[in-house]
Amino acid sequence: MTTDPLLLTGEVDDATARLLATAETLDATAVAAPSLLPGWTRGHVLAHLARNADGLRNLLTAARTGEDVPMYADPAARTADIEAGAARPPAEHLADLRRSAARFVDAVAAMPVPAWAATVRTHRGPMVAARLVWARLREVEVHHVDLAAGYRPADWPPAFGHRLLHEVAADLAGRSDVPALVLRFDGSRHELTVGEPAGAPVVAGPAPELAAWLIGRADGRVLTVTPHGPLPTPPEWI
């Protein structure tokens, strides 16, 4: 599953177009309504997506120039920017999403090939710049679902669902607070394991639904468990 930034830019463009199409349908009442994220309205999600594009653009600038440009000034400033933007009218949200997405695209286009190997400082820790385009794609696709406006994990492109599932399974495999699992996607003999597979329940279903369940964006009702029983409870991811 590639996370090559030059191969993912088209997927980011497509995901952004889908997000903008959803945002265009939201009136003021819909923007102020709750999202799937506790304590956040849809306006909070939209504001976060715009500021995330600018934050990732900052990191691309750091990788390109060698300067220490943080993703956000600090956690408090990140929170304040989202709160300040959440209650804006729908047209302002839409314009901000478009402009910030365009700035991110321009920053990607400005990257010389060697700069993709640079390490940058995200708000969660160091990251190789080559993963920043994947990070943006993941933010757009997952938070599009969080808008609770008709876009669901089943609407994710298959390649995205598989990449996300592999990433989450690999991240969870190194944690001690995760129940042992065998993850099997429909139509495939390929399995991913989390923890010790011997005796672990097998959770099966479409890759996007498995990924969404693991990150708390789906209740797993379309998944099956063998031997029969309740779904394990995955921990919070990010």
Image (cartoon, helix red, strand yellow):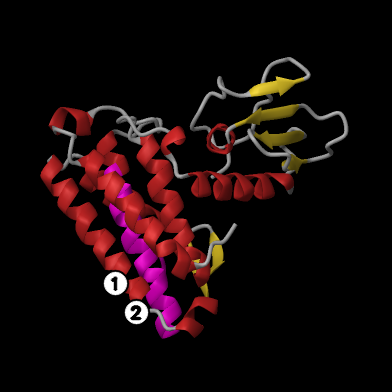
- Which sits in the foreground, 28 or 186? 186
- Which sits in the foreground, 236 or 229? 229
* Number of dots carrying numbers: 2
- Which sits in the foreground, 149 or 29? 149
Residue 218's place in the image compared with 1, above or below, is above
Report if residue 54 lies within the magenta region.
Answer: yes
Image coords of residue 90 (percent x, y): 14, 41
Residue 207's place in the image compared with 125, above or below, is above
Residue 75's place in the image compared with 238, above or below, is below
Q: Residue furthest top?
A: 229
Q: Mark 1 near mark 2, Cβ–Cβ under 8 Å?
A: yes
Are there few (<14), some (14-19), or many (20+) residues within 10 Å of tag 1? few
- Which sits in the foreground, 189 or 42? 189
Report if residue 56 lies within the magenta region.
Answer: yes
Image coords of residue 77 (percent x, y): 33, 56
Q: Residue at x 69, y 35 (%)?
A: 184
Q: Residue furthest front?
A: 187
Amino acid found under the numbered disc labelled 2: Ala
Instruction: Residue 77: tell me if it is visible.
Output: no
Q: Residue at x 53, y 35 (%)?
A: 212
Amino acid found under the numbered disc labelled 1: Asp
Placement of the C terminus among the 4 image quadrants: top right
Q: Residue at x 36, y 31 (%)?
A: 39
Image coords of residue 76 (percent x, y): 37, 53
- Check disc 1 and report the residue beneath it: 106
- Check disc 2 and report the residue beneath it: 110
Magenta-drawn segment: 46-71
